[in-house]
Amino acid sequence: MSLDYILLGILRKPGTGYDIKAAFDEVFNHFWQAQQSQIYRTLKRLEDEGSLASRTEPSDRGPDRRVYAITPRGRERLREWLSGEPVVGEDRHTFLAQVFFLDELGDMEASLAFMKRLRERLAERRDTLEGIDAYWREHDPDYPDRLDDADFHAALTLDLGLMKTRAQVEWAEKSIRRLEERLEKKNGRMAS
Amino acid sequence: MSLDYILLGILRKPGTGYDIKAAFDEVFNHFWQAQQSQIYRTLKRLEDEGSLASRTEPSDRGPDRRVYAITPRGRERLREWLSGEPVVGEDRHTFLAQVFFLDELGDMEASLAFMKRLRERLAERRDTLEGIDAYWREHDPDYPDRLDDADFHAALTLDLGLMKTRAQVEWAEKSIRRLEERLEKKNGRMAS
DNA sequence: GCGCACATGTAAATCGTTACATGATTCG
DNA sequence: CGAATCATGTAACGATTTACATGTGCGC
């Protein structure tokens, strides 16, 4: 359902399914993902509904491009969504489910190793976002608070990604310290 | 896919579909959600696969209970998952998609109002988790670092929920300040 | 000639949500 | 007697993933 609105938002500037897939991978990646096949199918449905319209045009390179754009009806749908309540919830963190059940391995060394690998993965994500932030900071003197309204809103979303991934890395580091303390205590008891 | 492993983890202690639904609502809520209908369907599939076994027994109250428990095969599957790589990614925040496209409304007052509502929703979630944390802190002198291994791992997951929702609320508050500054500047220009 | 970027789709299966459907027991 | 809790399921639909399938034009 949300994908519908995201496509409508993106297609305020006309583009192809291929363009949209690239946008998901580059821009929206930190808060939404979509497969190519899902994008094409949803575009078709939105056109059938009258929220999008498409025209086919030749490509400079490669097959014909099917360029979609939002219609007045689609714009109305988008505005309704934006005027409604913030949609909060549906948090799913697979790695937390893993952490929750890690006691099954009966080996706190294994838990520690898991958390260290997890810290690396999370730090990679953080570094990616910090790289994007640093890039904009360097290349646009208006970043982040003097950008135009559209880019300012985009910068707000990047900022949450940054704050959230930093919090996750801090949590992983704190958890590693806590696990190490438990292991030291246990080894202390074994030595005595 | 992950739901499979979560059910296997839960059913290391035997229980019914109803029990599992209650566990999702009470314990796992901050990192995973599942509908009752999805739980029953998945239990059936896992039993067909041989990862779970069930027996029917009378209930003290209400209809017969179908009690599921993990099998050796299921335990093996669970351990493989826990021994593998941390599963990171697939972050979906619908409200960030809304923030991203909020410029469509062409009204920064509307953006500000949206962010204020969002802050309230996020703060509610944070307060819920802080309530749970405070409850344990008060009722169990071993919380959080002297708990047994299973509860210690559970406490780690709650801690991420806490750190993450706090970061989200801080982001919302910071964003509100940034929006207010933009509005002040704009009004300043209009007044001059 | 090969690989890459461009470009569009279909098929099959599972996941996830919402709604429907039923019935017993307990407590006020 | 009515509401809440205990308890299990099905149906239908849409969302999502993974794999398959095809073809062009450019640069090395």
Image: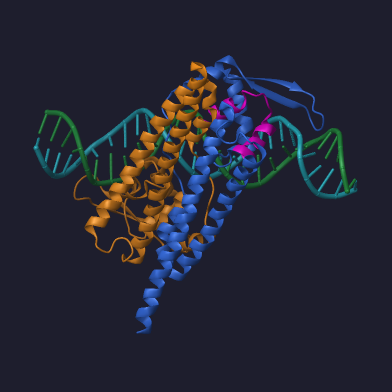
Chain colours: A blue, B orange, C cyan, D green
Residue A86 visible: yes
Q: Which residue is outermost to the front? A: B192
Q: Position of residue C20 (x, y in %)?
A: 35, 28
Residue D28 sits above or below residue D12 on the image: below
Describe residue C18's horizontal placement relative to residue B131 as left or right.
right
Q: Residue C5 versus residue B4: which sits nearer the camera?
A: C5
At a point 65% along the width and 32% down the height, the residue shown is: A20
Q: Which residues are magenta?
A: A1-27
Q: Which residue is outermost to the bottom? A: A192
Q: Residue A49 versus residue A94: which sits nearer the camera?
A: A94
At a point 31% along the width and 44% down the height, the residue shown is: B128
Describe residue A54's horizontal placement relative to residue B109 as left or right.
right
At a point 47% along the width and 55% down the height, the residue shown is: A170
Q: Residue D18 versus residue A138: which sits nearer the camera?
A: A138
Q: Position of residue B136 (x, y in %)?
A: 26, 55
Q: Position of residue B61 (x, y in %)?
A: 19, 47
Q: Quadrant of residue A29?
A: top right
Q: Which residue is outermost to the top? A: A72
Q: Position of residue A192 (x, y in %)?
A: 34, 84
Residue A189 sits above or below residue B4 on the image: below
Residue B11 visible: no
